[in-house]
Amino acid sequence: MKGVSRMTQQEASGTMYTPGRKPQDVLRHSFFLCGERDRIKQVFAKGNQQLGNMSGKPKLTYFEGRGRMESIRWLLAAAGVEFEETFLKTREQYLKLIKDGYLLFDQVPLVEMDGLKLVQTKAILNYIAGKYNLHGKNLKERAHIDMYVEGTMDLMGMILVYSFSPPEQKEKQLASVLEKATTRYFPVYEKALKQPGQEFLVGNRLSWADVQLLEAILMVEELKSDVLAPFPQLQAFKARVSNLPTIKKFLQPGSQRKPPPDDAYVATVHEVFASK
Ligand SMILES: N[C@@H](CCC(=O)N[C@@H](CS)C(=O)NCC(=O)O)C(=O)O
């Protein structure tokens, strides 16, 4: 009713009133317009919301560091998708995300895209890989990609644990990471790439598995720079994939790729989760 009286005032001031028109017609007309105006407003609001979700860049919420978000950044970058980032710095920010219903399991990473609030790292990566044709041409290719991806995830997971381990355990953890990388994981990828003409791991085109493998190789090299010496196929693969335009761009300084974790990053994580 508030709206009606506002419209009536407008009309009384001359905008809607036309000579010969009865006051009740003006009132009826203004009521119709008022209803229409609200409806039009709603349509525009919904349209803008959809537009924002559909055409906007994906929004990533995580710490300003690698962690579980880094593979997501890599995959989006490889697909040539620009994204925005919000960095968690305080516990209040984290609690607000939970309160506002953004985090299905009260955990990050969070990726907002296509109107979805995506959580769970693998679900997010699956969505991106599917959307940008990085998940194989058929179910069998997809199965191979998933197996290779899981291998790199296990390896990178060990490195993640190593980064957070106490100083007295670091040396042992490092030896274990390098041993697993060179005897369990890298030989599998080396063999896969040895097939004649095999430029990528699956189906001779770039997939999620290649993106993850390059990420994992670079992470292990940060721990031991000559680790690829016994793996000529992996060396060639690294050079080849690093040179793909989208990936080359992501590897340039100043990109959204994050550095290895430092003490400040670890302290922020502990503060946000009140874990120490
Ligand atoms: N399975 C989840 C695990 C996510 C997870 O553990 N996230 C951490 C940050 S890296 C977190 O939010 N921890 C807070 C908590 O578990 O309460 C995923 O892969 O995304």
Image (cartoon, rainbow, N blue to C red):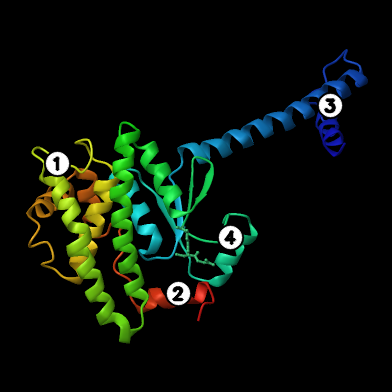
CB of mark 4 near ligand 1 (< 8 Å): no
Q: CA distance from mark 3 to mark 1?
A: 68 Å
- The residue under label 2 is 268
**Quarter-wise, where is residue 214 in the image?**
bottom left
Mark 4 or mark 1: whose residue is earlier in sequence: 4
- The residue under label 4 is 97
Q: CA distance from mark 4 to mark 2?
A: 17 Å
Name the residue at the bottom extreme.
168
Q: Residue 168 at x, y = what percent?
A: 31, 87
Mark 2 or mark 3: whose residue is earlier in sequence: 3
Nearest the eye: 193 or 213: 193
Please tell me how crowded label 4 is: few (under 14), some (14-19), or many (20+) other residues with Cα within 10 Å.
some
Label 2 with label 1: CB-CB less than 8 Å: no
Please name the amino acid that badge 4 sits on. Leu
Q: Is residue 135 visible to us here?
A: no
- The residue under label 3 is 31
- The residue under label 1 is 199
